[in-house]
Image (cartoon, rainbow, N blue to C red):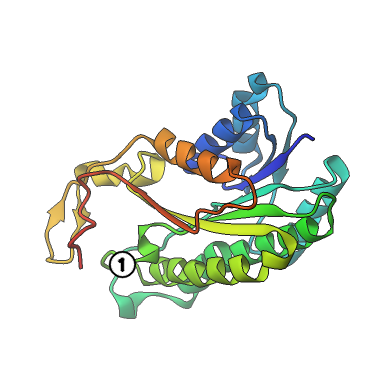
Amino acid sequence: MDKVAMVTGAGSGIGRAVSRALANHGFNMVLVGRRPEALDETAAEIAGAGVRSLAVPTDVGRPASVRALFDEIEKAFGRLDVLFNNAGIGSASVAFDELTDEDWQAVVDVNLTGSFLCARHAFGMMKRQAPMGGRIINNGSISADRPRPMSAPYTATKHAITGLTKSIALDGRPYDIACGQIDVGNAATEMTEAMVQGMPQPNGEIMPEPRMDVEHVAQAVSYMAGLPLASNVLFMTVMATKMPLVGRG
């Protein structure tokens, strides 16, 4: 049986790398993101893997947009075996009291509501399909465990992803739906280029931080995705070995 995987935030960074890796492991791909041109670039990169791909521009924070996305998946493939909830954004690095309502809501809409909406629809499809079951993998980030300075919206939503992961893992048991979370630290993507110059540390210093090849994240997600449904990686941390994580705070 051909298996189908969906990746949100598939137009760049971790999402694009994971999409390539899953395609190379034989998954037909549903590529999801806001920018059609970026999704088309990802689709072109996986064209040689011998799998089908479907690029669906989607705002994951809007219920109607996610509903339309899953209608497209139903029409094209009739099932979904893996969801990688990866889409995420941050807010401006400002003092806590300077965060605006718009800053907060934008991050919540994408990082938390978007993950919930995609997981809810995926859960329903996995529950109904034959054979029943599937796997949901949430991108939690190191911030699901501990914050960076001036990152309250991002950190709060990523902490919430941990609760979402545990709830899905528990509620999915009767339906062979496994759920796990990958927490990534300093993958080398466009979003982390500032780390090379320096990032604020809890002691007030600005310090360059090591990064790791994003392909190592893709390998980790592929491992999680490829497990039989009787086994699950509930939490995995993949990080640059020398990044200031252990002891940070």
Is residue 128 visible to the viewer in this orientation of the structure?
Answer: yes
Q: Nearer the viewer, residue 146 or 201?
A: 146
4 to 206, vertically: above or below: above
Q: In the structure shown, which secondary structural element does the residue marked by tag 1 occupy? A: loop
Q: Residue furthest top?
A: 48
Name the quadrant containing residue 76: top right
Vertical placement of 21 versus 70: above or below?
A: above
Q: Residue at x 19, y 48 (%)?
A: 198
Depth check: give the residue in front, 158 or 230. Answer: 230
**In which quadrant will I find the C terminus?**
bottom left
In the image, taking residue 133 as reference, residue 223 lies left or right, namely left
- Evaluate whether residue 10 shows in this view: no
Residue pictured at 63% horizontal, 45% vertical: 228
- Expressed as whole percent of the image width and height from the top left, the position of residue 176 reads 70, 58
Residue drawn at x 74%, y 54% is 133
> In the shown orientation, is residue 232 left or right of residue 52?
left
47 horizontally vs 164: left or right = right
Q: Nearer the viewer, residue 104 or 217?
A: 217
Nearest to the observer: residue 242 or residue 111:
242
Q: Amino acid at mark 1?
A: Pro
Residue hosting label 1: 147
Residue lying furthest bottom in this view? 97
**10 Å crowding of disc 1: few (<14), some (14-19), many (20+):** some
- Where residue 187 sits: x, y (%)? 36, 43
- Using the rendered view, name the quadrant where residue 94 is placed: bottom left
